[in-house]
Image (cartoon, rainbow, N blue to C red):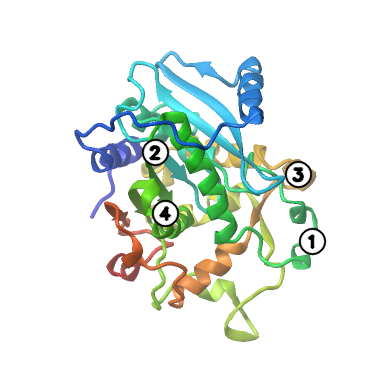
Amino acid sequence: MKLPKRSQNFLQLSRLLSLVLLGGLAYGMVEMMPQAITAQDSTTKTANSQAGLTTLMPSQILREDFFVTSDPGIQIFVREVRATSSPTNTRVPILLLHGGGGAGLASFDVNVPGYSVAEDLARDGHPIYIMDIRGFERSTWIAQLDAPPEANPPLVTSEEALRDIDAVVDWIRTRNQSQRVALVGWATGGHWAGMYTSRNNDKVSHLVMLNSLYGVNAAWDYRQNFENPERPGEFDRTAAAYREATADGLIANWTRAIPTDDKSQWRDPAVAQAYQQITLDNDPTSGTRQPPSVRLPGAFRLEAYNLSRGQKYWDASDIRVPTLYIRGELDHWSRPEDLKG
């Protein structure tokens, strides 16, 4: 099977997601949820607007940036993307969840014309929300990321990610007067989305997982990379709190997965560059190392290793909402067994 041309990849995926998420149905207005937007959220919105972060683009797409409180001391960055020509609440709100590499903006709202998944979905009438899990991009920087990587256990577990997701989901429900929110998760983001939905069916309208691991014991190409070389079958916890990735390291696996010497046949170089730049720019320490690198929390690697060996952090039988699992034939993170599982 041949992949679509690079100019169609994101657009076709976003159209598929939009069709699956709602089709021709519309959500009615419901009573405002009791969760209130905090004063800090409103202040941040005003400050961001004054700083020029709230921008009306020529394409009639409005972007606004917010911070939502999760655990005490943890502020979660959220970007809202709306089409100004679309009535609000005509379609279900969608929350986009990144994986363990570049976070929300790098994954879903790159500043390359035609390649923002968030913008494409917003044009179809969905209020779109992009968030960063703690320790990623613009959300609260974790102090342990400033310590040597061997000084702490793997950072940002699924349990912590789910608390961040829950805070944002409740905020979205309040903001849109909506009972439920659709979740779209990529790779580890799909694992988080599935785990969250299995516990919160009443808050989720639809679940979409793209190239995500599930708890199935099957061969996995990364297992050897993550194992203790002296103790096969055991995760290597040495320096596992976080990893440092350079610009080239951020797209290395992506590059290897493209089966042609000329990578531009499958990937627009501008998209790869935007993904790299956004990710590096949002690590406040990236410029202190040469070459510049981003620090990425490492617990997702431990959990992915465990998932690949059959450990279930959640059970698909607990999900009771319409669910779509998408897996690319040449994906290098998920496996056919995850789809079957």
The residue located at (63%, 19%) in the rendering is: 46
Return the disc, 4 or 3, that comes first in the chain's sequence. Answer: 4
In the rendered structure, which amino acid carries the disc numbered 1?
A: Pro
Query: Which disc, if any, is residue 285?
Result: 3
Query: Which disc, if any, is residue 200?
Result: 4
Q: Residue furthest left?
A: 24
Query: Which disc, if any, is residue 148?
Result: 1
Query: Could you tell me residue 76's position as x and y percent?
Result: 61, 41
In the rendered structure, which amino acid carries the disc numbered 4?
A: Asn
Return the disc, 2 or 3, that comes first in the chain's sequence. Answer: 2
Query: Could you tell me residue 172's position as x and y percent?
Result: 47, 36
Nearer the camera: disc 1 or disc 2:
2
- Tag 2's secondary structure? strand
Quadrant where the N terminus sits is: bottom left
Marks 1 and 2, how far apart at CA: 37 Å
- Tag 3's secondary structure? loop
Disc 2: CA contacts within 10 A as few (<14), some (14-19) or many (>=20):
many
